[in-house]
Image (tube, rainbow, N blue to C red):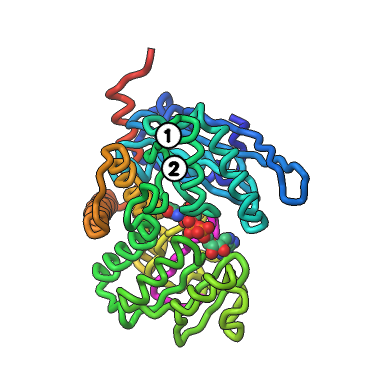
């Protein structure tokens, strides 16, 4: 399967093989579960502001269609490849199944740097991508959402483009839309809030006092900034480290996260904020803290730093932040470091996306309190199941979480049978 050749896809496959061995999945069933069902690559020619035409590469991977339509975010990042997209789609499958959502996993995106595009160029790239995807997606086939480098506005352009071609408004084709065009209350904050809900649960299990705890958060975007604000303002945790793609800041006395948010709203990133406290990004991760929340990119906790981490809880807001080699080290340190694995920790986004899709299909609106309440109920249930399974089988939280997800997909495939 050379089209998926990529280090991140290999990592997702390696993780799957660990689970397949633990669940003693028959060799005949492994590839069927692991490889994506459908993948599409599209070429997107776009008029740029300087009069040139630039060609971008876009992808969409639908991992499995066994439990319902596929669901997954759209990433705009310079290095995006088909393999990385496939890995993210596979993780989405296990995440949706763990939360018991009627979806298979998907992921898509464009290899581009959205920070280097003007607003007009970003709109043109986004609309051209959705237009190319029309034959492959649909509210009952594959529903898109946001991910790194995309936001509510991009989702609104996707929805508008799809609707223009259909001839009527199709809200339910994307989630993560602005509330003014059918988005659900609380979707933007859902992933970060879910991360913090589980950090609070873990702190309470471990009998930690939030007001005496500190947190370092990598990534200050949709997930990281919301998590930092909620941890500081609601849970009372002191935030001692934050970072983005440009700078990392570490201040043991605490960081004013609201001021950091204001700075990013004005300047676009953390450059120029608390310059006296800047630190090398890699160094920030290994500073002493109670909670370490990687909320940016994949593969930042590796065999090079896993034994140096000085935190009690790792809350994986990002997808794939820990490599399988680092997992082996963290598994040895299970009584020192409590890991909340990505497919559990950041599931808040897809859970509230599911609510948005249901509301779109039914043309029915829920309040933010209803959304938050339903979100926490699902997260609580998933957390309890993972903790129970890990204890019962003496396996890591990641193995327990993935096993529950993989098992659900496998059971559904077995029950449906193999066509024809
Ligand atoms: P975003 O684009 O809103 O923010 C990403 C942040 O990470 C930015 O602050 C960016 O500057 C920073 N960043 C990028 N590269 C970095 C690097 N090398 N080191 C440190 N910081 C870096 O993206 P997001 O939506 O917050 O997504 C972050 C992560 O969470 C991704 O792994 C994504 O797949 C995952 N996730 C997002 C959602 C969601 O609902 N948005 C849901 C589940 C998982």
- Please state the total of marks drawn on the protein image: 2
Which residue: 56% across, 83% down?
274
Answer yes or no: disc 1 within 8 Å of ligand 1: no
Above or below: residue 407 compared with residue 119:
above
Report if residue 250 is visible in the image. yes
Q: Report the front residue among 301 and 265.
A: 265
Q: Are marks 2 and 1 in contact (CB under 8 Å)?
A: yes
Which residue: 54% across, 37% down?
130
Mark sitting earlier along the chain (2/1): 2
Above or below: residue 398 compared with residue 163:
below
**Callout 2 environment at 10 Å: few (<14), some (14 to 19), or many (20+)?**
many
Cα separation between marks 2 and 1: 8 Å
In the rendered image, the quadrant that contains the N terminus is top right
Q: Which residue is mark 1?
A: 142
The quarter of the picture where residue 47 lies is: top right
Q: Which residue is mark 2?
A: 72
Answer yes or no: disc 2 within 8 Å of ligand 1: no
* Residue 197 image offset from top left, x and y in percent: 30, 63
* Residue 354 image offset from top left, x and y in percent: 32, 44
Main SS of residues in magenta: loop
Mark 2, secondary structure of its residue: strand
Above or below: residue 273 compared with residue 354:
below
Residue 290 in magenta stretch: yes
Residue 164 in magenta stretch: no
Mark 1, secondary structure of its residue: strand
Q: Report the front residue among 62 and 138.
A: 138
The quarter of the picture where residue 249 lies is: bottom right
Q: Report the front residue among 398 and 177.
A: 177
**Callout 1 environment at 10 Å: few (<14), some (14 to 19), or many (20+)?**
many
Q: Which residues are magenta?
A: 287-303
The quarter of the picture where residue 206 lies is: bottom left
In the rendered image, the quadrant that contains the C terminus is top left
């Amino acid at each position: 399967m050379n089209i998926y050749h990529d280090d991140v896809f290999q990592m997702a496959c390696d993780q799957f093989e660990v689970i397949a061995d633990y669940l003693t999945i028959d060799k005949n069933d492994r590839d069927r579960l692991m490889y994506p069902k459908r993948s599409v690559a599209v070429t997107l020619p776009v008029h740029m502001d300087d009069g040139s035409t630039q060609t971008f590469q876009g992808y969409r991977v639908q991992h499995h269609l066994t439990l319902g339509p596929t669901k997954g975010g759209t990433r705009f990042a310079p290095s995006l490849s088909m393999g990385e997209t496939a890995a993210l789609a596979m993780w989405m499958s296990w995440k949706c199944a763990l939360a018991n959502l009627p979806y298979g996993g998907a992921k898509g995106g464009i290899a581009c740097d959205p920070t280097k595009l003007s607003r007009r160029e970003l709109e043109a790239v986004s609309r051209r991508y959705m237009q190319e995807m029309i034959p492959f997606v649909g509210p009952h086939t594959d529903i898109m959402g946001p991910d790194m480098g995309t936001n509510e506005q991009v989702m609104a352009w996707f929805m508008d483009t799809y609707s223009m071609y259909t001839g009527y408004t199709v809200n339910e084709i994307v989630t993560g839309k602005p509330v003014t065009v059918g988005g659900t209350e609380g979707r933007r904050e859902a992933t970060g809030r879910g991360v913090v809900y589980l950090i609070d649960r873990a702190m309470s299990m471990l009998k930690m006092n939030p007001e005496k705890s500190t947190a370092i958060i990598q990534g200050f975007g949709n997930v990281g900034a919301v998590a930092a604000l909620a941890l500081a303002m609601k849970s009372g945790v002191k935030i001692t480290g934050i970072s983005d793609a440009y700078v990392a800041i570490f201040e043991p006395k605490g960081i004013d996260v609201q001021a950091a948010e204001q700075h990013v709203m004005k300047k676009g990133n953390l450059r120029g904020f608390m310059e006296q406290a800047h630190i090398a990004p890699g160094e920030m991760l290994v500073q002493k803290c109670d909670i370490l929340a990687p909320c940016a990119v994949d593969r930042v906790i590796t065999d090079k730093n896993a034994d140096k981490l000085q935190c009690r809880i790792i809350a994986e807001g990002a997808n794939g932040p820990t490599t399988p080699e680092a997992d082996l080290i963290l598994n040895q340190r299970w009584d020192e470091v409590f890991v909340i694995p990505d497919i559990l920790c950041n599931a808040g986004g897809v859970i509230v996306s599911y609510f948005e899709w249901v509301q779109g299909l039914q043309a029915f609106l829920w309040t933010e309190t209803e959304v938050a309440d339903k979100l926490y109920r699902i997260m609580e249930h998933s957390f309890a199941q993972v903790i129970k399974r890990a204890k019962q089988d003496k396996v890591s939280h990641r193995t327990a979480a993935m096993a529950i997800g993989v098992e659900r997909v496998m059971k559904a495939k077995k029950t449906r049978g193999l066509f024809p």
